[in-house]
Image (cartoon, grey):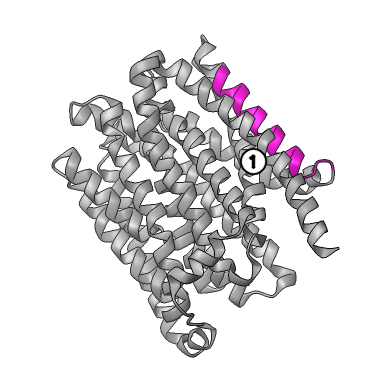
Amino acid sequence: MPPALLALAAAAFVSGANLRLFDALLPTVAEDFAVPPTTASIVVTAFTLAYGLFQIVHGPLGDRIGKLRVIGGATLIASAASLGCAFAPTLAALAVMRFATGIGAAAIVPLALAWIGDNTSYEKRQATIGRFLSFILMGQILGPALGGALAEFISWRRVFDVMAAIFLVVSVVLFSVDRRGRAHAAAMASPHGNVWRTYAAVLADRWVRTVIFTVFLEGAMFYGAFAYTGAYLKERFGLSYLLIGGMLAGFGAGGVIYSLLVKWLLARLNEKGFVRLGGGLIFICMATLPLLQWWQATIPLFIVAGFGFYMFHNTLQTRATEMAPRTRGTAIAVFAFCLFMGQAGGVSACGLMIRLLHYGWTFTIGGAGLALLGFWFARRIDVHRLQSQALVN
């Protein structure tokens, strides 16, 4: 694996870990600052808000000055902010540092995918992207487990020492590779006209608005509820943080299983089947979780939830790459922005719902919403196909 791709894979790993880190850490952070989990969830909202918001900044910037250079600078910011998290004296300070971490982490995945597209032939690109995405999934699997283990045996603060070190190493490697390949990067850079005019042109397409509306709701309903599963397990079963982290890692394991079976599944199901089945599986898992009497039974539930989520979400990702072919980078930036804005808003909304309705109804309503969303989007796929055929004819 080339040094740049290896560094990008390491960055993807730590980015994936950061996205799911507080699934296990939220209860212990809440205890440390003497606040309920619904209040401590501000650290989740802060990270996802910055992560989504700065997607639309990093994409055009990478096109102008070089993708590796932007990722290198962004991971340096994330390293410094992660170190700040380790020493945050208050919950507010921790939220600010997580917001800064999100600013840096936001550059990694979209620009890394763009770099792979620039530097990999089409015949090898799908396999290369598949290997790259597996590092994100592994980060999502091991992030909660690492967070739970360090919180149990040392301190949740030490998690951020590890994150800061990885971000720093990645930054150094990327800056080094960027200097050696500066001529090629300059050749690939493609400045455009007014950025906001380009975004407006993308959003003028009704199908684009349909896809990004769907991913916004997906992020809000799934990630909004899932952020509280660690707190629920702690409250319901009194489990250790190490065990909670290991259990929540099952979500990423479900994603890995999906990635291994996707070719087989595609031969048997079309995109409509993917979103319907994915939404249905999530609903079953979320509605069943509050009914289980034994914590051991939740383990396969998280695996199935991860499988269903990636079945749904990967379909949206695939559609996003083709929803505006002439301005693909801008379109994917909008897609990512809406996903994480949905997640940030969903965490806050689900926190309010938990206060009013408790965990069980919150999980069930979120799952039911995703099932309905899957059926609705499947119908929109049919409508879009018919409209596209009419335009061709």
Residue 281 colored magenta? Answer: yes
Q: Is residue 300 visible?
A: no
Q: What secondary structure prevails in the magenta region? A: helix
The x and y percentages for residue 189 are 50, 82
The x and y percentages for residue 188 are 54, 83
The x and y percentages for residue 261 are 74, 44
Q: Quadrant of the C terminus?
A: bottom right
Q: Which residue is mark 1?
A: 312
Could you tell me which residue is drawn at 50 percent across and 33 percent down?
A: 221
Q: Quadrant of the N terminus?
A: bottom right
301 relative to 102 in the view: left or right: right
Residue 316 colored magenta? Answer: no
Q: 213 and 259: which one is in front?
A: 213
Above-or-below relation of 229 to 8: above
94 relative to 221 in the view: left or right: left
133 relative to 375 in the view: left or right: left
The magenta span reads: 268-287
**Which image quarter: residue 270?**
top right
The x and y percentages for residue 340 are 44, 47
Could you tell me which residue is drawn at 31 percent across and 45 percent down?
A: 46
Q: Secondary structure at mark 1?
A: helix
Above-or-below relation of 149 to 184: above
Could you tell me which residue is drawn at 69 percent across and 75 percent down?
A: 121
Tally the marks. 1
Q: Look at label 1 and name its amino acid.
A: Phe
> Which residue extends farthest left?
89
